Image: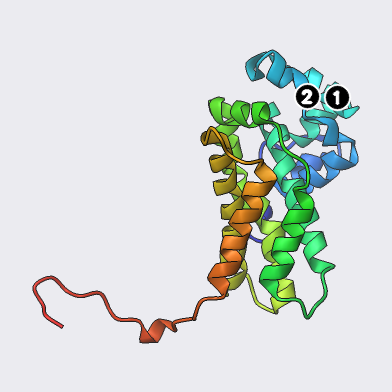
Amino acid sequence: MVGACTAPTGKARATGTRTSPRTAGSPCANARSWDAAGAERRRHPAAVEQGFDNLRVEEIAEAAGVSPRTFNNYFSSKEEAICAARITQSERLAAALRARPEDEPLIDALIDVFRAEHIREPSRAVFRLMHSTPALSGEFLRSAMAAEAPLIEAIAHRTGTDPAKDLLPRVAAAAIFGAMRVSIQQWMCVADSPPYVTVLGDALNQLRALTATTHIPCQTMSAPRQPGRTP
């Protein structure tokens, strides 16, 4: 895997000779296993209703149908567990991209995959909570690299590129996630903003328009003009 998905995270726990899930534990591996435990239900309404600081690990674990001990095996904090949702989303996007027809242009495949994933209007209250709670917003940013990694791998597989050497997979993933981030900002900050799914669709179309412009090879671009020199 690429980037943060190759790095262990959080504390490792072991009992006797048994290794806990966290010891193997990249954010991606933890998120996949946590979802298998039923954590898609972890978006606990109490976090919005009573405030994140008042939300206990026990409540998140109960909503996911697991014990607090199981929760602690996978995550070092409630912030990490909640933000893992974006990693599992990226895993779904990557799987969907791999399933697209091989002859479909990359930008069309990416846009269709993202649109299919975002068919429901998200909760403004949840996003406000994420951005107004320092601990959550910090973890949200930290998890960004891990969230991009599965999609980077899928793009590299589709294009026959090496994500460790070639820019294309990382640039494409950054562009598509950037469109999503800008869409959230527009939807949250503009008073009369259209629905989020509409804003996201417009942002993705902007990316499509960019790919239709004439490509200028780097070697033909003019070098920056030095101060005091005339062309």
Task: Examine the image and state in which quarter residue 165 appears.
Answer: bottom right
Please tell me how crowded label 1 is: few (under 14), some (14-19), or many (20+) other residues with Cα within 10 Å.
Answer: some
- Where does residue 25 sit, x and y in percent of width and height? 74, 46
- Where does residue 71 sit, x and y in percent of width and height? 80, 29
The N terminus - image quarter: bottom right
The extreme bottom residue here reads 220
Mark number displayed over residue 184:
none
Q: Is residue 219 above or below residue 81?
A: below
Q: Is residue 148 above or below residue 225?
A: above
Task: Examine the image and state in which quarter residue 54 appears.
Answer: top right
Q: Amino acid at mark 2?
A: His
Residue at (66, 48) in percent of width and height:
198
Q: Is residue 198 left or right of residue 24?
A: left
Task: Examine the image and state in which quarter residue 129 appears.
Answer: top right
Q: How is the image coloured?
A: rainbow
Q: Is residue 31 left or right of residue 152?
A: right
User: Which residue occupies the foreground of this view, 76 or 201?
Assistant: 201
Q: Amino acid at mark 1?
A: Ala
Query: Circle 1 sits in a helix, a strand or a loop, which is it?
Result: helix
Can you see residue 1? Answer: no
The C terminus - image quarter: bottom left
Can you see residue 203? Answer: yes
Residue annotated with mark 1: 63
Residue annotated with mark 2: 44
User: Which residue occupies the foreground of this view, 182 or 172?
Assistant: 182
User: Which residue occupies the foreground of this view, 69 or 194?
Assistant: 194
Residue at (75, 48) in percent of width and height:
118
Q: Which mark is first along the chain, 1 or 2?
A: 2
